[in-house]
Amino acid sequence: MSEQDAVGLTQTLLRFDTVNPPGQERACARHAGALLEQWGFRVDYHEYAEGRTSVIARSGGSASKPPLCLTGHIDTVALGTAAWTRDPFAGETDGDRLYGRGSSDMKAGVAAILLAARNLAGKLPGTPGVVLVFTAAEEGGCVGSQHLVRTQLLGKAGAMVVGEPTSNTPLVGHKGSLKFHAKFRGVSAHGSMPELGVNAIYKAAKAVSRLEGFDFGVKPHPVMGGPTMNVGTFEGGQGVNMVPDEASIGVDIRTVAGMDHRALLSRLKDLLGKEAELDVFSDMNAVWTEPGQEWVQRVFDISGKVLGARPTAKTATYNTDAGNLLKVYSGAPTVVLGPGEAQLAHQTDEYCSMARVRESVAIYEAIICDWCGL
Ligand SMILES: [Zn+2]
């Protein structure tokens, strides 16, 4: 299988171990970048840490209309503890299935974006063109894109396709994410004389019970549903015979379109009290484009023709880099649309459908042609 074919290129990408942690996307990113340079793209790299490499590639560009962004991540999640029956890094196939860690999530999507871009490379100069953004460290907090938005490398984009696994059905957004740790301090003392100390666990526990009763005061979104909150970690104390002088909780909030994270955070700070020390480590707004938006309708037309049925407005259950990239590409209509199977993401014996990967090359090409007037 040639690397010039969607399946062959997915296999090549799968053979780079980009399991995150530790990530180490550099070799895979450089490989994609070298191909893009060969095809005439202008390529930039960004490393937010040693070996944590993102790639930004451009072709075309015009003063009258910004380019179309197609984006995907290079890293994958770990293999998990269960044994695989297939080699996760060999690109084994069986019938229509292509196995490997990151096949569905989302090296198939990256390969399809690359090949669609290659197929049109010769025609892009003089048109609005494309900007391709392949990120490091998406898994576990979209850290790579968080760093990218602080650079000048992203430029502009007028619309965005995120190639995460959707079985080639365009989705019009996903929930936002606000995650933080809240630390509470006390004074340590001997467990037999608790009156001499201040118990940090009691403070944290009271905060948790206030959070449990928290009312977002938000009407459910017609497609996304309501916001959610989960207290996922509770840590504190060094021994049963000591008054704990430190306790900390980890909170995961999923917001819906229209919610203001800053206002929400300020309400939560009031609720948790002045003593709580907050460390917000993920802050990405919900991604939502009105399904009736003109470009989204055209994407629905294009994918509907290939899929045989017109898509309806749905959103993804997972987060994507779009939450960060839209901080720069503000207001760009965005769809999540990629060849992988969402339910196989992060699974043991992850695979993708080879037919879908080829199908997605055709869909991406049609979306680029539509955007660039080809
Ligand atoms: Zn993904």
Image (cartoon, rainbow, N blue to C red):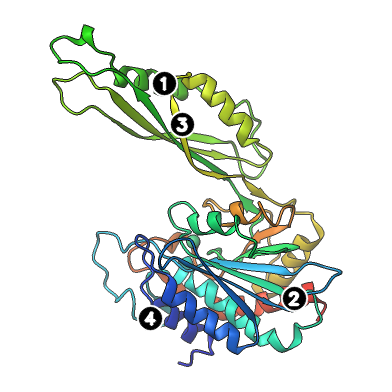
Please give the name of the residue rendered at 65% of the width and 61% of the height, measured from the top-left corner: 152
Compare residues 171 and 176 and report the one nearer the observer. Answer: 176
- Vertical side of 228 occupied by 189: above or below: above
Label 4 CA crowd tier, 10 Å (few <14, some 14–19, many 20+): many
Compare residues 284 and 339 and report the one nearer the observer. Answer: 284
**Label 2 to label 3: alpha-carbon separation:** 42 Å
In this figure, what is the number of numbered marks?
4
| Label 4 sits on residue | 91
**Label 1 to label 4: alpha-carbon separation:** 48 Å
| Label 2 sits on residue | 129
Please give the name of the residue rendered at 13% of the width and 20% of the height, measured from the top-left corner: 241
> Of callouts 1 and 2, which one flags the residue occurring earlier in the amino acid sequence?
2
Image quadrant in which you'd find residue 61: bottom right
Going by the numbered disc 4, the residue's amino acid type is Gly
> If the image is split into quadrants, where does the C terminus sit?
bottom right
* Circle on res. 207: 1
Image quadrant in which you'd find residue 130: bottom right
Mark 4 element type: loop
Residue 312 locus on image (x, y percent): 69, 57
**Is the C-beta separation of discs 1 and 3 under 8 Å?**
no
> Of callouts 4 and 2, which one flags the residue occurring earlier in the amino acid sequence?
4
Going by the numbered disc 1, the residue's amino acid type is Ala
Going by the numbered disc 2, the residue's amino acid type is Gly
Residue 109 locus on image (x, y percent): 54, 72
| Label 3 sits on residue | 278
Find out if the beta carbon at label 4 lies less than 8 Å from the nearest ligand 1 atom.
Answer: no
**Label 1 to label 3: alpha-carbon separation:** 12 Å
Between marks 4 and 2 in the image, the one whose residue lies nearer the viewer: 2
Mark 3 element type: strand
Between marks 4 and 3 in the image, the one whose residue lies nearer the viewer: 3
Residue 8 locus on image (x, y percent): 47, 86
Label 2 CA crowd tier, 10 Å (few <14, some 14–19, many 20+): many
